[in-house]
Amino acid sequence: MDRSSREPEGVFAGGARAELSSRAARALWWGSAFLVLGVLGTSVLVEGVDHGWRLPVASALVFVQVCALRWLGRAPVIVLAAVAVTGLGVWALLPAVTLTGALLAAQVALCVVSATGPRRVAAGALAAMFLAAPPAFGTGGPAGLAVYLLAVVLAWTAGQWRRAQQARMRAELHRVVMEERARIAREVHDVVAHTLSVMVIQAGAADDVFTQQPEQARQALRAIETGARSALGELRLLLRAFRPDAEEAGTGDDGAGEQREPGPSLARLDELADTVRATGMTVNVHREDATAGLPATVDLAVYRIVQEALTNTLRHAAGADEVDVRVTAEDGCVVVTVVDNGRTPQGKGSTAQGRGRTTQGGPVVAGAGAGRGLVGMTERAHLVGGSLRAGALPGGGFEVAARLPMERAS
């Protein structure tokens, strides 16, 4: 993706070689040209009526300024120098125009240099414009000097304001991009980690009984196929954000007209549990009807938290053969608990089979082998305004408990 497709068209960008887009450059030229012709051109015509040959020469210099402004978006520093020289020429021919009016085009160019050029170049341009202060004082006195300095400072300040505005826009764009990348990374991690964990267990089970119990091996292989297809379907949903045209009306890579599975949500909680049951683990699911109709972001967060907790049970809970999943409503919040019966090692520390431990709203303290699972669940809970805690239970096993507000989806 090129730069022009990522940045808003027609904005000022920092850097010595920054250029405006063609549309913005044309708009800038037309606007500045009308301003110079309307103000300076009119002043030259009025003040030069009784000055013989000076009127056409001054008019020609104004025309040169207007033409030079055509390249203001590409080479603002050069244009600033050109219009400043020609403006001084206009003022020398017709002093009644005033220096501030004669350098109107230079003030426009100064604004662009201040907005687009490096800061040292912008400061140098401002200093160069200040060199004309003595002539302004000589012809207009204190009032003329004050007007000239005020016009120059306002032009430079307007450019600095535009520069700051663009910096904020770029910072906001960068923040949004980083958040979107993090969101996609969490989604991919949740999909791939869960599916691969189930597939590894199923593949091991199929290998163990391949000769003695071929039918059971075939069931494990079918479970692997089902899980892989489901994961591919979820990954395609993520890719649709980048290829919306190709995915509409069944025109994507998955074949024309192929019906897509719905996205991950609590409505598919039983399907998620079935993939874990296929590994031989008992999964008990209890979900209250009051949790139906959650905001989309909360619904997805609940599903992903349950998915990651089940994945952690498969990967890290030694000796676990049963896990309880409960999704209930309580005081305007959806409460999610996932508890397994794996063995909890005794000894120093608060990790269970390589899993980290969190406190409500606190940081994750990762144990040996701990990955992004608990961190990702905690981030998901915080994104929707909720909290999550996870840790080993005194009587054995491991619990993940999240509390998410039903009405907040930010």
Image: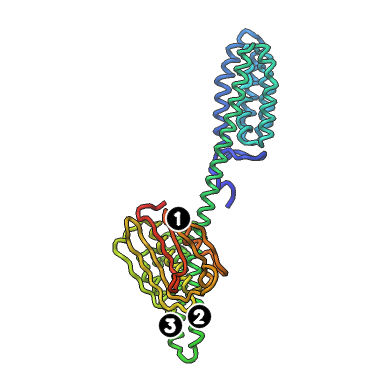
The numbered disc on residue 382 is: 1
Between label 2 and label 1, give the one nearer the viewer.
Answer: 1
The numbered disc on residue 203 is: 2
Between label 3 and label 1, give the one nearer the viewer.
Answer: 1
Q: Residues within 10 Å of mark 2 (few under 14, many from 20)?
A: some
Q: Going by the image, does 328 lie left or right of 314?
A: left
Q: Residues within 10 Å of mark 3 (few under 14, many from 20)?
A: some
User: Within the image, what quadrant is residue 81 found in?
Assistant: top right
* Callout 3 amino acid: Gln
Residue that appears at 38% across and 52% down = 408
The numbered disc on residue 219 is: 3
Q: Going by the image, does 236 lie left or right of 18?
A: left
Residue that appears at 69% across and 15% down = 135
Q: What distance separates the C-alpha of mark 2 from that of mark 1?
A: 36 Å
Q: Going by the image, does 99 lie left or right of 375?
A: right
Q: Indicate the position of residue 69 as horizontal and vertical percent values.
A: 62, 29
Name the residue furthest top.
50
Q: Indicate the position of residue 279 as horizontal and vertical percent values.
A: 44, 79
Q: Residues within 10 Å of mark 1 (few under 14, many from 20)?
A: some
User: Within the image, what quadrant is residue 163 found in?
Assistant: top right
Disc on the earlier residue, 3 or 1: 3
Q: Indicate the position of residue 349 as horizontal and vertical percent values.
A: 54, 68
Residue 385 visible? yes
Disc on the earlier residue, 2 or 1: 2
User: Within the image, what quadrant is residue 406 found in?
Assistant: bottom left
